[in-house]
Amino acid sequence: MTSSRLAVWAGILLLAIATLPPAPAATLAVTSFQDAPDGSPGNGFCAATSLPQAPCTLRAAIMEANANGEADMIELSAGVYALSIAGIDENAGATGDLDITAAVTIRCLDCQAVIDGGGLDRVFDVRPGTFDVGFTNLTIRNGNATNSNAGLDTFAGGAIRFLNGSDLFSEMHRCHLLDNRAGVGGAIYADGASLPDVFQLDVFDSEFAGNLVEGGAADAQGAAIYSRGHLVISSSSLHDNGSTVSGRLFGIGATIWHAERELQLVESTVDGGSAEGIYKTNGNLRLRSVTITDNAKSGVSWRSDGVAPAIFWLRNSIIAGNAADSGSDCFLQPTAPSGLDNNGYNIDGGTGCNLSTADGNQSLVSLDAALGPLRRDLDLPARFPKPGGPAANTASPDVPGSTVSACGPYDQLGNGRLIGGRCDIGAVEYAGLFKNGFENFIIILPP
């Protein structure tokens, strides 16, 4: 065969290889609750060869998914996956936290898996890159990012650190982030600084509780979440998160600390934080059907420097019972910003939210919102409005979900919104309780 014909056939072969479809994403089934690395990442097999019978561990599955480079699925079973290999500031996933460098979804299908950091390191470290990450049906607890202080990013994110715009898009469904600690971002640190316009984190049906920030006087921001990218939180409860840092510095220890891009909360609770419920600087803040109460400082602190247009949009929401030390449920700077759009069926325990009480706005100010205690026995803890109180059946009269100002069709707990004929203001609908008169227990009325 002539050299020219060889060249032609070689070109055809190369073209065929180049046009082959990419390798299909793998589903990696984790078969062991032990903690051990993969023996040979990239060989197509999840196998912790240091363990008898070389099972697939969570650490090994992530290492294999990183090497594979495809959008893999890692399947867990119900139970506790305890991280036990010490070694902070290592970024290959072999020790300490679980480093993620490629697209992956980690889930427990029809179950709840617990991933326990054991206080050794943070739990997940999502490294820089343009890939998507998902977490579903997980409890992520006891992460600790306070052991290294080489720089702000190093001691950030007790449960999950999304480093320097590490993803284009990340989702979290039905997760519980509990008792994590860090210098900044007690549970989640999502910087997004290098990719602020494309980085987005969406959180659905999730709980953040008992998370703590322990940074210096200027660093302890975001007891539950610290973010500079687009952030959406829906049907979630963020309660009892705090900081060891005392003082009146704005934003220090806030449950949610967010800057520059848009923050949206819908059908959610922010309760019992040791500082502000939400600290927002620049960028839009949109709140619909939320309850923000019992936070030690302002329920919402919103600041705009006026350089870029910013909106504070509020509908069907309660911001009341906060700031025992200052008496202000909202702190707005400027106090009457041009982007203020909060005139629709809201309750402000004081007057700091600058709500309009003019006819047609139906907002209420300077009153007790008449909420019950925080129901920590619920999967997503919340406070129910008391019957006959100002929040009961007083939200927007629009059909749920029909307009941008209407409440959604379901509340934070997934109950239908039209209990009593009209939506309640806040995150949840009142669930009527009564004794049936014959039995010795209480029945909760279905939606």
Image (cartoon, helix red, strand yellow):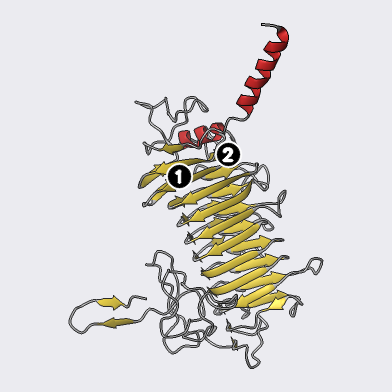
Q: Amino acid at mark 1?
A: Gly
Q: Amino acid at mark 2?
A: Ala
| Identity of the residue drawn at 71% across and 50% down | 195
Residue 118 figure quarter? top left
Depicted 103 relative to depicted 318: above or below: above
Depicted 390 relative to depicted 378: above or below: below
Give the residue number, with chain letter if any, for mark 2. 102
| Identity of the residue drawn at 39% across and 36% down | 34
| Identity of the residue drawn at 62% across and 90% down | 360
Residue 148 figure quarter? top right
User: If you read the primary sequence from the N terminus, does the residue marked by circle 2 or circle 1 appear first?
Assistant: 2
Give the residue number, with chain letter if any, for mark 1. 118
Rendered location of residue 166, percent (x, y): 64, 45
Q: Quadrant of the N terminus?
A: top right
Q: Secondary structure at mark 2?
A: loop
Q: Nearer the viewer, residue 302 or 17?
A: 17
Q: Nearer the viewer, mark 2 or mark 1?
A: 2
Tell me if 280 is positioned left or right of 447 in this view. Answer: right
Residue 348 figure quarter? bottom right
- The answer for how far apart the CA atoms under marks 2 and 1 are is 25 Å
Residue furthest to the left: 438
